[in-house]
Image: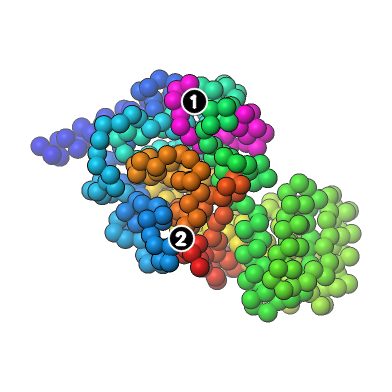
Amino acid sequence: MKNVFLKSACFAFAAVFCACFLSACSGFVSKRDNYYTQDTKPKEPSIPPQDRGYDAYGQPAYQASPHEDVFEAPLSPPLYSDSSAPLFADVKKEKTRVAILLPLTGNNANLGKTLLNAAQLAVFDVSHKDFELMPFDTNALGARGAAEEALDAGAKLIVGPVFAQEIASVQAVAMESSVMMMPLSTDTSLADRGVFVMGLAPSDQVDAVVAYAVQKGMRNFTALIPDTVYGNLVADVFRRSVAMHGGSVAGLEMYDRSGADLQERVRSLASSSDRIDAIFIPESSDVINEVAVRLTAIGFNPQRTKILGTGTWDVARIGQKYPVLVGAWYAAPDPAYRKNFVSSYKTFYGQEPPRLASLAYDSVALAAMLSKNNMPYQEDSLTNPNGFAGLDGIFRLTPSGQVERALAVLEITPEGAKVIEGARKSFIH
């Protein structure tokens, strides 16, 4: 009889999921039946309990003593299992409604749908029966319109939007209702009080790789950085980080990515290459090849001068594509943390998730966990100094809206990146 019930539940889930997905494809999701709750649950846990991330027993680190390293031991017993005892007595209460603002139609619909998939997994894994995730289409409604609809529907927290240009309009609406928001953008310059930008901050990446290089005896640094908004932000962080860790910047060249200008900047670095320990190149993987070609042309020797970069290199087989980067170091989340999430996502949705998917999962999982423990979506709850453990490692939200993350340092090999310095396990020193 139990097996029959389970099978019926599985068929019910499939029907609900298909309805939700089709509705998201067609535009704005507004009907109550299309909200996501723990009742719309897969037939088996999407992520093995011991690997789901967040904190043991599904509780935040704030329960621990301030002198206890709460993340030092492996996360066990299982996280978020159905048998976990609630922190508080189960009492009748109103639904906790959280909105997620995504482009569910239009040119960016595929991205929006994959992020919604990740958010759904978080609901399945973490939430309780009184938690509802409400998706709204920023393409059909506009970002501001989606935010207004979300608040009218009773949202107590907004996850999203995705694109930087949408954040200001959503923030204006959210502030009027004193509702916090967690944009999934990587433009951390837009962080503000009550606006927790969940993207991976370049400052954490730069500081982690520079600190490791200095630890390994490197003192003289140079940099080749694109003259963009991102590049200028990274250049400032690089200078501060090198000075803070006791190194010196012997040269820093900004270029406009045109071939002639890049060649000239590379040549200007060549004269000092014999006394440089490391060169910092915060370029994306699709541009790094041209930079590597220019460096090779002037006789750059990666065996003598270490190449440093950021998490933009955190892509598969980059060492095979660009051999000059073999041996280079960069900082990024430890890939082991999200390995099982990627596997589960592929099992349920038939494709590998985009890199941003973990941000959607962690944001919704954090919201569900706080709701599960009767914690309001207020600054004190969200900015707990002990932080939380997510798919990309531990992180904590700061009152300024920045999200601080503990990162690993990786080395590029022909077979793939390998961790050479693990991320710290706790924000408690």
Q: Give the labeled residue for mark 1.
A: 150
Q: Is residue 139 above or below residue 201?
A: above
Bin the neighbour count of mark 1 within 10 Å (Cα to Cα): few under 14, some 14-19, many 20 and up. many
The residue shown at (36%, 52%) is: 59
Residue 133 locus on image (x, y percent): 41, 32
Q: Is residue 175 above or below residue 207?
A: above
Magenta range: 150-172
Residue type of the residue flagged with mark 1: Ala
Which residue is nearer to you in this view: 95 or 41?
A: 95
Rendering quarter of residue 122: top left
Front label number (2 vs 1): 1
Q: Circle 2 sits in a helix, a strand or a loop, which is it?
A: helix
Residue pictured at 89% horizontal, 53% vertical:
260
In the drawing, what numbered circle is on residue 336? 2
Residue lying at 63% horizontally and 34% vertically, measured from the top left: 167
Q: In which quarter of the image is the N terminus?
A: top left
Q: Is residue 201 visible?
A: yes
Q: In this view, does 250 lie to the left or right of 369?
A: right
Q: Where is residue 400 in the image (x, y as percent from the top left)?
A: 61, 47
